[in-house]
Amino acid sequence: MNIPLNHFSPEIIMIVAAFLVALVGVAKSDAVRRSAQWISLISLILAFIAGWHIGMVDSTAAWPLASFATYDTLLASGIGILLVLLSWDMPFAMDPAKADRTFRGEYFAMMLVSLAGVSMMAKVDNLIWLFIALELVSIPTYIMVATGRSNPTAQEAGIKYFFLGSLSAAIYLFGFSYLYGFSGSTDFSKIASAFAAVPQLPYIAMIGLLMVVIGIAYKIAAVPLHYYAPDVYQGTATPVTAFLSFAPKAAGFIALILVFNLTGWKLSHGAARAVPDLLMVMAVLSMTIGNVLALLQRNIKRMLAYSSISHSGYMLVGLAVGPLMINHSITNGISAMLFYLGAYSVMTVGAFAVLVYLQGKLDAAEDLDDIAGIASAHPLAAACMAVCMLSLIGMPFTVGFLGKLFIVQAAFSSGHGVLAVIVMINAAIAAAYYLSIITSMYLRDPWTPFTVRRPGAIQFSAGIAAALVILLGVFPSVLMSICRYSGSEVTKMVVVNNSQAPAAGKSTAAILPPIHLVRSRSTPRPISHTTPLASTHTAVAAAL
Amino acid sequence: MFQFLQQFTPDQHVEILAGLIPLFPLAAMVIIAIFGGTALKGRAHVPAIVGIAFSFFLALLLLIIFDVGQFNSIRAALLHLTPAQANHFGAGNHEFLQMKFATWFSAGGFRIPFGVYLDPLSVLFVSFVTGISLLIFIYSSGYMEGDYGYFRFFAYLSMFVTAMTILVLANNFLLVYLGWEGVGLASYLLVGYYYPKRSARDAATKAFIVNRIGDTSFAVAIFMIYLTFHSLNFVNVFYGPLQSASFRAAHQSMMFWIPLLLMFGAFAKSAQFPLHVWLPDAMEGPTPVSALIHAATMVTAGVYLIARCMPIFMHDLPVLHLVGIIGTFTAFMAATIAMCQYDLKRIWAYSTVSQLGYMFMGLGVAAGSAAVFHVFTHAFFKALLFLSSGSVMHAMGGELDIRKMSGLRKRMPITTVCLLVGALCLAGFPGWAGFFSKDEILSAAMNSAWSVGPWLAAVGLLTALITAYYTFRAFFRVFMGDLILPQTAGLHEPSVFTLPPESSHESHDAHSAHVAHSAGQHSHDGQHGHDQPRNTSFDGPISMWGPLVILAIGATLVGWLGVFGGHGDQGWIQSFLARVPMNAGLHYVPTPPSGLLLPLASVHRISPAMGMVLGGILAIVGILVAWYFHLVNRHAAEVVKSALRPLVTFLENKWYIDEIYHYCIVMPLWYLGRTLYGVDHVVDGIVVNFFGYFPQLVGWVLKPTQSGRLRYYAIGMVSGLALVILGVLYLLR
């Protein structure tokens, strides 16, 4: 690895803390065991500060994807803080009398290891490392799902999640082996050179990419492999559901960006078109199926599971559009996707935090009836939930609005008008079921008496999440600039890879006319507006 | 004291004044939200009214500043100008003023500021929005007194007005969209305010969902505007490359799609066919909310949007004509529906849809200032009609069926006079507000160079006749004739929060106690208790009838602004709006701002005076018909009704549009959902079972220990992968 070791300090902090928590968690004294949460919290805050510091000090000089990695670290540790807070009393969730006291340490240790995997994801430069990082994220989540609740549904969900997750790992590992077979190396720079050297994507590489995409679709709960999500989300404990809606999804999307980066995004013509086309089909199916099926749900966790599928669809739009950027577009698809990832994580974790806070029949509020009329008894909790829901709908002044704005804008300005309009129609449909949650809270009388969780940490995490949703919606500059830097780094990689092409041995003439992206960056010619606009026009015509 | 203001130019002073307008209701909202449940409680209306009063005051200042040629001394004093400067301030080179206060977000060249855009159009809108809202707020403090969640109501109202003022003052499309969504959200909360009623919840959801359709369309239009103009700022869009013919030729398709999508957005917000379905249901909210939605805040947004974007519409006449045709059709359709409704508020709701249709007719024939004039007068008389009806509802214990009451003038003299004024305006009786503004639209349509214009005007005249009829049908039924009071008269409007429909007995007691309490407050002479409700005046407290009287005076007078007070032979409103680029030539010649195209010429088919006479005669005829059937000989109305049974049924069912929606949109979507659900289950179950049959057999032989379903999932995944890869290979072969 050519990345300086100090850039791994956030991950090192998290892993060390994970071991510490595992040790503390089996202590005899209850007071010592109770320090597990504090250790987790403090380590994540330290990791956040370390990540911020590295990003501020010397990131750009270090290696090409430095801001991208910084964003990933900040996202993992920042959302991690919220997740630790909302699972503060997790080990005693369902039955305080029977709770296994050693449980606490395990849970937070698993969480920290998984977050370390997410944080490491953007720093890997080798297929083996990529696989290890992905598994580092996944394996702890299998344990968390299975042990989160002691009832049979949770066990079944855990087993299902574990076996299918392993299968998906096998699928993308198989894909990695094709990439290795194509390039003869697992090293990213060598694979990138190999891609840059061939005029057209060979089948072997393309099949490899397809398998990677489909395998990782499991991690991000996108359409061909989305079946497990509703069952698992509903079956397991709510804090674990919150974790599942963030960690595997973030890891999966970052892994996809890294893998496509290898190809130099030469995916717009010839056989390689299959990859973005597949992504677009997956995106459209994910958001449509997710939204329409969410309309039929009355269980909020199930509804949010389908909503998570549909939001993966929106993010896949950004990925399918890629780093292509014409004049006057606000951001490219990758930056838009990264922004959306951050936005989605904050708002969905906020929603789950409120659910955890409102204790329901099992361990947290689950059904629409469980939260009926809470606005009168718990106005702040209801307000946090409402803010998160409005953000998921995409109301202005919330971060969700800007996320959708950038995604749709990236799709529009790269000529994918149909895709953009489908996103917007889906966003309009989605409003109906998010609204049913708000309606249930504000416009109904309490159905069942409900209790709330004592720990202030849970309220705190809901409050922070809701405040972030608003703050980032009104003052998005910080998040936007870091996403734009990350996205432009990906674009730079394209240029780097192409400039490496002659060095790789083949003649430059053999390379196909470079794709529009590279052209528009190397020669700042005035781009005529007719092409993308005309296609947008036909696209809208077709959509209407 | 205001030394720091010295650094700004007079223009910027004006802009800062305008920028403060949305902040007052916003502050009121925040204060009520924080202290409403604790410190304020029953006084929650105070911050709301104070906030909106400040906004209204600032809006009035803006109106004075922008009224070029008048109030020069006030302007000079306000802005520290010399008399010569004051004389010219805002004239000549100032078609508009705009200023950016802060940046919302920026990315590369893309920058969205918080800024205001001031021209006579936005100034006129913001002044009547805040003015009418102020009166409605005052009325609400009496009407909602003692209601559960009193403070919540005023917080929502303040939010509503905040969003509307942002919408009207914004200087770019994204900020307009912010206000647009905010208005939608606030209306959702307010329409669903009586949430224990199922109909209120349904109406709120319906309003939100229908508005989402329009919002989506508007959002797509915004993206297209950005792609075409590379900016969302009004100045850059309207006064930039749009003026060059070659630019328009290069973006021909955009020049069609942008106005079309803006039109759909406006139609959803302003309740035009086929997106009008939410507005009549929205009267499920408290009456002041209906008044606010129908008069000042919500529905005028669509008219504002199209009037504001007139430079774009002017370049694509087919879309502009479509606006006019749909508007005219909606005006006619809604008027016919209003003829056969029995709920007083529902009649006014359909009349709003109909009057909005007139406004879009005016925009469609490029008579922007006539349309805006009608918005302006309509705001007064529709607020008046709704608030008067609210007083009726208040007095009649929540009853609004016009078949159950009669002769109320004997009990509610003030309300009767106020509602009569509103009805005269709506009917277009000569001399009252609606008469001037409606006839201006009709004569513009009549004289339009567009050959369809006169036909629209003809339909409009027929609609005017129907309007006069249904307006006075309601008036004669409710206020004239013998005194008939419904059973509930004298009771306070049943509060849905204390009166679940199941437990009618115990709630009756609670209810009477409530009445005893409220009757003491509501009879303004204070001597008559609730034991003699039939001798009591039902007009309500002064906070209720005071605003009514002001509105009645306003509704009587504002119409004359269209005739007198302007430059030359123009009315004040025409001169005031002349600098806004939204008019084709009418009977006066507007001075086009620099370089703006005004492609629609006008012809002279009919003189304005003739149009006025025609409109006046039709209004009187309509009133006379209503007078005969609903006052002199009410039995005749029943005879005619039974003779025309199929037609009446058709109209009573509102042209079956809700049913069409149900069968064409709601049901298919529901079936799509079920189908997808089924497909998911099929893949989950049958297909996977089928693929899993073989391993199941093997597993049965090998005595499986694992959960069965899991295997099917795994096989489903692998077969899905195989299908994708084989499919891609097949497609690329």
Image: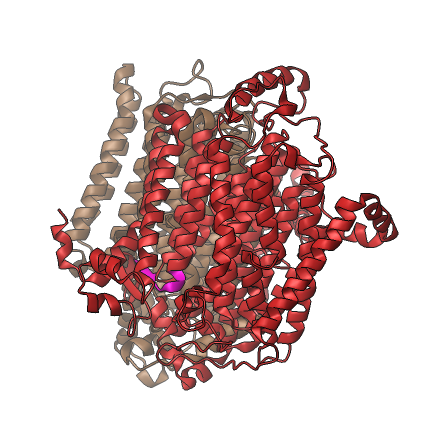
Provide residue A381's location: percent of width, then percent of height.
Answer: 41, 31
Name the foreground residue: B108 vs B717.
Answer: B108
Specify whether B590 is left or right of B483: left
Provide residue B697's location: percent of width, then percent of height.
Answer: 69, 42
Q: Is residue B302 above or below residue B419?
A: below
Name the foreground residue: B92 vs A174.
Answer: B92
Q: Is residue B637 magenta?
A: no
Name the foreground residue: A510 vs B657.
Answer: B657
Chain shown brown: that is A
Q: Residue at x 57, y 40 (%)?
A: B388
Quadrant of residue A228 in the image?
Answer: top right
Q: Residue at x 50, y 35 (%)?
A: B544
Chain shown red: that is B
Provide residue A123's location: percent of width, then percent of height.
Answer: 27, 53
Q: Which residues are magenta?
A: B115-122
Q: Is residue B117 magenta?
A: yes
Specify whether B438 is left or right of B664: left
Image quarter in which the C terminus of chain B is found:
bottom right
Q: Residue at x 43, y 29 (%)?
A: A356
